[in-house]
Amino acid sequence: MLIILDNYALQVGPVTVSVGKYTVKVGDDVNLLLVVPMDKLPFRLSNGTIVGKRELRIQSIKDKFEREGNAVFRHINGNASDCRAVNIARVSTYDALVHDSDWTTDWECYVTKKEARFVRDNIEAFIALYQFQAPQE
């Protein structure tokens, strides 16, 4: 699996990036787009910056959601302990994340509290991952 890492050169300044047999020198004004195999993450840039920890964590959490079939349920009345069929609706992971602040859903039961905080701190990245996910029926 490949992952795209973008804008690292702008964030860290001039660097030399080496991944496997490839080496690229990048200056201050270059917008760098890296496509890196997941098994090569994380790695260290020549200036000491470690790249890829965040992306690995995002992928790890996404894998947890996928192991559960991306099955997210919404409690329509906002009460998570009200599990009557009339109060439960299956929603896409995308919709659950987009409406995280105003819906009560169960996506958090698949991750630790620390991971749930990480998802909320990086909500835009997770929304982007699921943006083109097929709607649930």
Image (cartoon, rainbow, N blue to C red):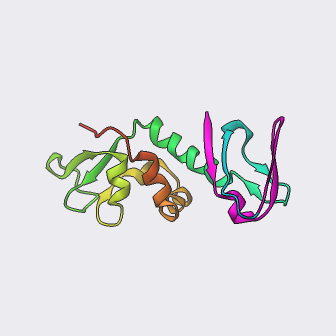
Residue at (28% x, 40% y) in the render: 135
Taking depth in this image into account, of 51 and 7 the one nearest to the observer is 7
Magenta run includes residue 13: yes
Taking depth in this image into account, of 30 and 127 the one nearest to the observer is 30
- Left or right? Give the position of 127 relative to 60: left
The quarter of the rendered structure image containing the N terminus is top right
| Image x and y of residue 136, in percent | 28, 39
Q: Quadrant of residue 134?
A: top left
Residue at (70% x, 58% y) in the render: 30
The quarter of the rendered structure image containing the C terminus is top left
Q: Quadrant of residue 28?
A: bottom right
| Image x and y of residue 6, in percent | 62, 53
Residue at (32% x, 60% y) in the render: 99
- Left or right? Give the position of 28 relative to 61: right
Magenta run includes residue 48: no
Residue at (72% x, 59% y) in the render: 9
Magenta extent: 1-27
| Image x and y of residue 130, in percent | 41, 46
Q: Does 77 appear above or below 52?
A: below
- Left or right? Give the position of 39 relative to 130: right
